Image: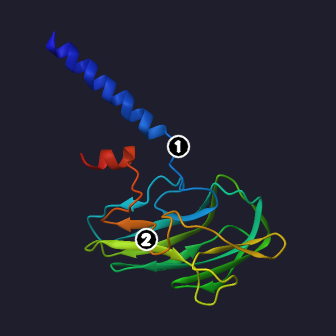
Amino acid sequence: MMNISKAILLTGLMVLMAGVAIAEPELSGPNALGLYFDGEAATSDLTLAEPTTIQVHLLFTDPTIAFITGWEAKVTISTGAAVTGISLPLGTTTVKDGPSEWSTTMSSPMPCNALTKLAVFSVASAAEQNTFLYLGNVDDPSIVSSLPAVQLQDGSWSAVPVSSGDPTIPVATINSSTPNDNTSWGNLKSLYR
C-alpha cells in the first residue's frame, strides 16, 4: 500500500514539473530588452563547470512597437567572460560593433513579435567566477537615456526598459543568479546531473 502512495506522489510531481516546463516565460514587461541563454527568454542564469563559448540572445520581449529599423545597446560584462562575436538577422548591419557598444541599422523594417531576436552574441566564459551581464545605452546615444534604444519606422528613437528593470541590475548571470531568477525545468534537471 505504501508503494502505491509513493508512485502516486511521484506521478503528481512529474505532472507538476511538466506543467512548469511548458509554462510561458515570465517576461519583465512590454518593450523590454534582455539577454538570455536561450531564444525563448526562459533562461537568464547559467551555471558552467568549465571554460566554454556560449550563445547569449538579445531579445526584445513583448513589444507594443510594430516595426523597428535599428537598435543600440551597451553590453557590460563584469568579469570572467567577454563577447567574441555577433550574429545578426538578415538585412541588419552594425554601426558600432563592440566589444561592448553595439548599434545596428536594418535595410527594411523588422516586424516585432512577442520574442524578437535582435542578435546572438558569442561569449567566451572562463567559468571560474560569478559573471554579471548588464544592458544600458551606448556612451554617445541617439536618444539621451541610460536605457538601450530602438529606432522606430519614422527614424526616431525610443528608449526601452531592460529585463532586470534597471540598467544597474544584471539582466543575466553566469554562476550566480539575477534578482528576477525564474526556475525552469532545465535548471531543476541540472541539479541531478
Give the residue at x 47% y 52%: 42
Amino acid type, label 1: Glu
Label 2 sits on what residue type?
A: Ile
Mark 1, residue position: 24
Query: Tag 2: Cα neighbours inside 10 Å, few (<14), some, or many (≥20)?
Result: some
> What residue is rendered at 63% in x and 71% in y?
88
Picture coordinates of residue 172, whole percent (x, y): 43, 66
Cα distance between the residues tagged 1 and 2? 23 Å
Which residue is at the far right?
154
For residue 159, which quarter of the picture? bottom right
Quarter of the figure with residue 2: top left
Residue 96 horizontal/vertical position (percent): 63, 86
Q: Judge whether 127 appears above or below 66 on screen.
A: below
Extreme residue toward the top, this view: 1
| Mark 2 lies on residue | 169
Disc assigned to residue 176: none
Q: Is residue 186 above or below residue 135?
A: above
